[in-house]
Image (cartoon, rainbow, N blue to C red):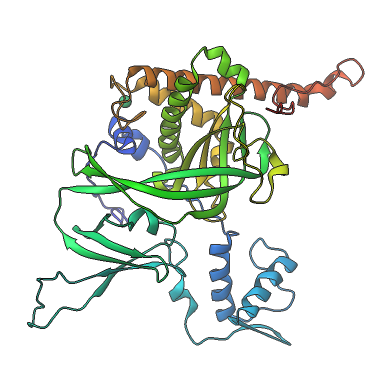
Amino acid sequence: RAGRRLTPSLAVLVACSEPLDQFVAGDPSYLLGRRPEHARVEPDNPSILVPHLKCAAYELPFDENERYGELAEDETREVLDALADARLLHRGERGYHHVSDAYPAAQVSLRGPVDENFLVVEEPRASGVGAAGAAPAPRIIAEVDYDDAPQDLHDHAIYQLEGRQYQVLRLDHDNHKAYVEAVEVDYYTTALLQTRVRVLERASGTGCASHGEVHVLDRVVGFKKIKLHTHENIGYGDVSEPDREMHTTALWLTLEPRDVLALGWTAAEVTGATMALSRALHSAAALLLMSERRDLGRAMGDARSSWFPVAGRGAKGLGGGDAPPDPRAPFSPTVFLFDRYRGGIGLAERLFDERHDLLARTRAMLERCECDEGCPGCVGPGQGVLIKRRAAKLAERFEQALGRELLAQRALEAQPLFGDARVQPHASSADAPREAP
Ligand SMILES: [Zn+2]
């Protein structure tokens, strides 16, 4: 809130080794020389829309044929009917009325939907004695978003709150509670997540860059212990958590097999470079969107698997065949960046619109980073100079593929200028149907 009265103010940023901090420390004009924020809000996301409709109905009942926001009449009615079916609104002859006395705006969180939040419960230490000598009672110290709970509150996780550390004793999925106890340790934890993404429907894009709806399957399989201040990795732990699924929107970048073959790398080298590149893309995307890294999810795959973008519209629905890819077919590396919010909030869509800029920035970040072996600011620490170089090379390949696609698209758009008889429109390589494996 500094500077709201237009008087001089001082802000101090203490940069750590995170990519975002390093970038800003290296180029402060990025932060200080531009408009503060272009906020991304997707008002039609059901998690945002429904609570707002409730609030609107509380202020003034809805008429039968009223529209809300960008929604059409029938779309508005659909949501109102759903709320009426859930007995949150009353559907009467004269429209929809709010039924409860509770002030619905109090239920709306600026951070996100609250309905299914997890409660963080501090258990008193066995030897602890309350201030008045009585046995201390468990107390609720925080609420965590439903989607963040598996990552932040898995067994043995260190949960940090207001400068204090707590260790999770157990996570009770059924009752949405995590029991913690206060500890003092010199590390924090990050969850190791296995993420699989499957394309449900492509909204735009054709060949190497697409945007659309995806099905994301997350599983926390363990965690890393990371030393405070230095961010050194000091150990691992296993966790067994149930899968989490969500539908959201993603940007995905795919390199065609012929572009991969042209690199002359082994499959392992391609995989390593794709992983390193995906990490750099993730950082560059967060920077471009001015979002937190954790607002975006990242996954890597092979376009040959049904969990990845092979079938486009045909892949709609869940539980389709998941045949293993043919090992003889050339690898087609794919990087997904997706909104880590159910239904999507528009991040991936903007990344798709700015895909050329995203790739150019990513490559610049990789080429300009002064580290030798990889660092948190580029491909991750200790990856090695080869991986870093290959990731930059791969970024360049993606850029070239995007460039070709753009040229082909412009050529198609320009066709009518030449008359339709002489120049036959030809499908660009990007439009050609992907060959079956
Ligand atoms: Zn680096």
Residue 389: image location, x then y, percent: 40, 17
Residue 319: image location, x then y, percent: 64, 50
- Is residue 367 found left or right of 315 in the rendered image? left
Q: Pick the residue in front: 42 or 196.
A: 196
* Residue 301 vertical position relative to residue 3 in the rendered view, above or below: above
The answer to whether any part of residue 13 appears in the image is no
- Is residue 73 found left or right of 308 in the rendered image? right
Give the quarter the ligand 1 occupies.
top left
Q: Quadrant of the N terminus?
A: bottom left
Residue 179: image location, x then y, percent: 28, 67
Instruction: Please give the count of numbered marks on the rendered protein.
Output: 0
Q: Residue at x 26, y 55 (%)?
A: 156
- Is residue 127 found left or right of 409 in the rendered image? left
* Residue 392 vertical position relative to residue 173 in the rendered view, above or below: above
* Residue 218 vertical position relative to residue 413 in the rendered view, above or below: below
Q: Quadrant of the C terminus?
A: top right
Q: Residue at x 44, y 24 (%)?
A: 273
- Is residue 310 found left or right of 349 in the rendered image? right
